[in-house]
Image: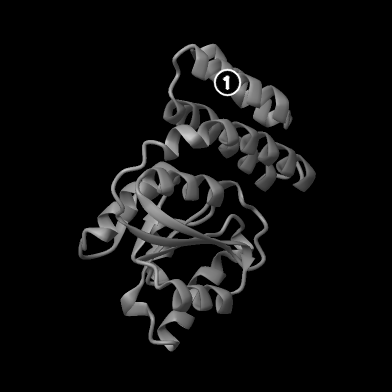
Amino acid sequence: MEQLIKQIQEGLLEGDAQVVKNLTEKALAVGINAKTIIKEGLMPGMKIVGQKFRDNEIFIPDVLMSSRAMHASLYVLRPLLTSCRLAFKGSVVVGTVAGDLHDIGKNMVAMMLEGAGYSVIDAGIDVPAGDFVKAVKKYKPDILAMSALLTTTMGELGDVIARLKEEGLRHHTKVLVGGGPVTPEFALAIEADAYAADSYHAIEAANRLITGEVGFISVS
């Protein structure tokens, strides 16, 4: 089991989509469940990719190849996760803020939320504050989940929250934020309702928001 998980991580780092897809299918065949593959294989692997990118050890084309490899694995895993969907809990708009073209974390959070019983509206990547506001007006979600994967785009999270206030939408929408450079302290400073360190913690944070828990929620 450990060897297969390690090979999946190596495949992600190499950006080999076909290898990662094949290894994912093999892991399922020998009894490793989908959540273990994600939590112990994909998430740590993509965390390494993100760190290497921030340290300028790899560049955007490398990240895109790793992203395609991760999506190849998720293509195999998605039916298993969504088929176990629980009773409907609420709706969530997810998106990556303006200036940020990374969709790895967002896609994983969206898939995990769906599997946990949420209706997910994917606003996409590089989403301007105004478009987030439009999505909130249109879909009236229980939660707006946003990510920023670059330090240069973190400020956009606060801009969206400010726009929601201006439009009179803030009190009706809980805001959950996350992403590599985002910290609980930053999330609290921009007046988000919750912070989650990764896709698994995002589910817990969303569940706590939906139940009406009072106060800032930080899950890591």
Name the foreground residue: 27 vs 55: 27
Q: Amino acid at mark 1?
A: Glu
Image mark count? 1
Q: Residue 203: image x %, image y %?
A: 36, 48
Relative to 72, residue 170 above or below:
below
Instruction: In the rendered view, tell whether residue 122 sits above or below residue 169.
Output: above
Q: Residue at x 31, y 48 (%)?
A: 204
Q: Secondary structure at mark 1?
A: helix
What colour scheme has been applied to the protein in the rendered image?
A: one colour
Relative to 195, 64 lies left or right: right
Say which residue label 1 marks.
Answer: 25
In this image, 123 relative to 89: left or right? Answer: right
Examine the rendering and report whether any part of residue 107 can be seen: yes
Horizontal relation, residue 107 to residue 144: left or right: right
Q: Residue at x 21, y 63 (%)?
A: 212
Residue shown at the point (67%, 34%) measured from the top left: 69
Q: Residues within 10 Å of mark 1 (few under 14, many from 20)?
A: some
Image coordinates of residue 86 in percent, x first then y, are 31, 43
- Where is residue 6? Give x, y as percent: 57, 19
Taking the image as drawn, is residue 159 in sight? Answer: no
At a point 56% along the width and 71% down the height, the residue shown is 156
Q: Give coordinates of residue 176: x percent, y percent.
A: 40, 61
